[in-house]
Amino acid sequence: MSNEELVQLYQNGDKKALEKLIQSNTGIINKIANKYNGINRELEFDDLFQSGVLGLINAVEKYNCNHEKKAKFITYAVFLIDRYIYFCVNGRGSKEIENNKFYNSCTSLNAPRGEDETGEVIGFIEGVDYGFENIEEKIFLQNLRKDLEEVMQSYNTLEQREILKSKYGWNAKPMMLNDIAELFNSTVSKVRNTEILALRKLRNSSWAMQNVKEFAELGYIDKFYLELMRERGDI
């Protein structure tokens, strides 16, 4: 049976369907937990896994099977599993762990060089793996993350947001495309196409266009992409 069918059974009163859902999605919970494993040294892998199970249960209870424009259950489940594990790590974290999460959130969002977009590269946020000493830069990147969260919420679908966050390590360690494809029960090609589309939407957003000059001055925009923007008359 599909996830959606099992969810429907559970919501109709079949409690055993929940056990089947947990069993069939154990691999997904493991993958997401592994993404966060090691960030908080106070937590065992089992702590992360159990938080992921709670996230899955929450997804099962809240998923609207009758919604006209509903996302696939696996997309919604990945979102909540990730959120629960993230809060598990964040809730008991030290300053070092907070910094690690912040650094990962600043990973460069570079558009992949696809057949239709050869050479189009954008770096909204610079990836770093060292401590910040420049308070102004730290505040700038924190605000940038907040703005980007809002833009993603407005321009990207839930699936697109989760794929971008998984690929670029938004809250934890970055994941490879093949792992993301397995996570979403999809193919590498489809995941990559979703990533390209999601990034294209961000690049073409009014927010990106309004801030491209500032990003360029601070070194967050690739020089080739900057020239491309000038040729198009965007700046």
Image (cartoon, rainbow, N blue to C red):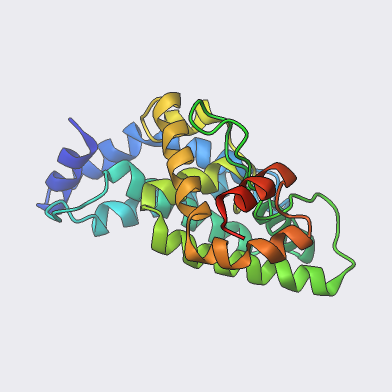
Name the foreground residue: 66 vs 212: 212
Q: Residue at position x 85%, y 53% from top?
A: 130
Q: Residue at position x 73%, y 58% from top?
A: 216
Q: Position of residue 66 (x, y in %)?
A: 11, 54
Instruction: In the rendered view, tell whether residue 99 sits above or below residue 230.
Output: below
Q: Is residue 27 visible?
A: no
Looking at the rendered image, the quarter that the N terminus falls into is: top left
Relative to 183, 207 lies left or right = right
Snapshot quadrant of residue 25: top left
Q: Position of residue 22 (x, y in %)?
A: 33, 40
Q: Residue at position x 14%, y 47% from top?
A: 8
Relative to 61, 111 lies left or right = right
Q: Residue at position x 61%, y 57% from top?
A: 89
Relative to 90, 199 lies left or right = left
Snapshot quadrant of residue 105: bottom right
Name the foreground residue: 207 vs 32: 207
Q: Position of residue 204 (x, y in %)?
A: 48, 55
Q: Is residue 17 visible?
A: yes
Q: Position of residue 234 (x, y in %)?
A: 56, 58
Instruction: In the rendered view, tell whether residue 33 sits above or below residue 154.
Output: above
Q: How many marks?
A: 0
Snapshot quadrant of residue 147: bottom right
Name the foreground residue: 50 vs 221: 221
Looking at the rendered image, the quarter that the C terminus falls into is: bottom right
